[in-house]
Image (cartoon, rainbow, N blue to C red):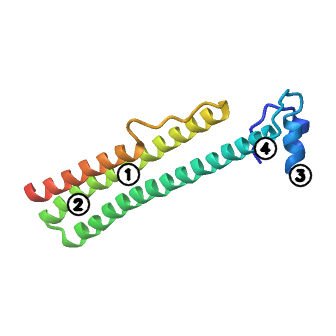
Amino acid sequence: MIVWSDKPLAIREKLPGTPIISIAEELMEGTESQDPQSPLAHQRTQFAKYRTQLALDRTTLAWLRTALTFATFGFGMVGFFRAIHQRANTPEAAELHQAAIHMGVALILIGVIGLLSAAAAHLLALWRLRRGEALPLSIWPLVVTISVLVSILGLYGLWSVLHG
């Protein structure tokens, strides 16, 4: 269980079985607040940070799934056209096999780039969350980057089919 607190370990160890109100009271111990809602607000802030971390984890897992799909499709494309090339040993089959290798390698690279970018974004967001900093919105999100790369790959494939 992750606790976003700078309080001593003795207080953090009590969290799993301790009632919510007493946890908030212990966390706020030593603060001079007259507002009776302060412990509850602090507790809600901690839960919000935890929910944000879980959302970041879900997003990173979705990127992992997408990257594996790209890489799997790239390997499958190369394998499929290799089998065609071996059976039909013609110049057209060899040309298709070479084009499939280029497309497959490009899909694998897009998957690897997407996965590494997602991991870096995840770690940066967690670091900022733990430091209490705001999580800024990206000017150029990872989704747009991968979409542009896939679009370029699609245009290349279309061009190679029309002019090949």
Mark 2 vs mark 3, foreground winner is 3
In the rendered structure, which disc, 1 or 3, sits on the residue that comes first in sequence? 3
Residue 145 left/right relative to 37:
left
Amino acid at pointer 4:
Leu
Whether residue 92 appears in this view of the structure is yes
Q: Which of 115 and 49 is in front in this view?
A: 49
Task: Find the distance from the CA under tag 1 to the CA under tag 2.
Answer: 16 Å
Residue 90 left/right relative to 115:
left
Task: Find the distance from the CA under tag 1 to the CA under tag 3.
Answer: 50 Å
Pointers 1 and 2 in contact (CB under 8 A)? no
Q: Mark 3 points at which residue?
A: 19
Q: Is mark 1 on a helix, strand or loop?
A: helix
Q: Mark 2 points at which residue?
A: 97
Q: Which mark is residue 108?
A: 1
The crowding category of the residue bearing disc 1, from other C-alpha atoms within 10 Å (few below 14, some 14 to 19, many at least 20), is: many
Mark 4 vs mark 3, foreground winner is 4
In the rendered structure, which disc, 1 or 4, sits on the residue that comes first in sequence? 4
Mark 2 vs mark 4, foreground winner is 4
Residue 107 left/right relative to 163:
right
Q: Residue at left 19%, top 61%?
A: 96
Amino acid at pointer 3:
Pro
Q: Nearer the viewer, residue 49 or 56?
A: 49
Q: Name the residue under label 4.
A: 40
Amino acid at pointer 2:
His
Task: Find the distance from the CA under tag 2 to the CA under tag 3.
Answer: 64 Å
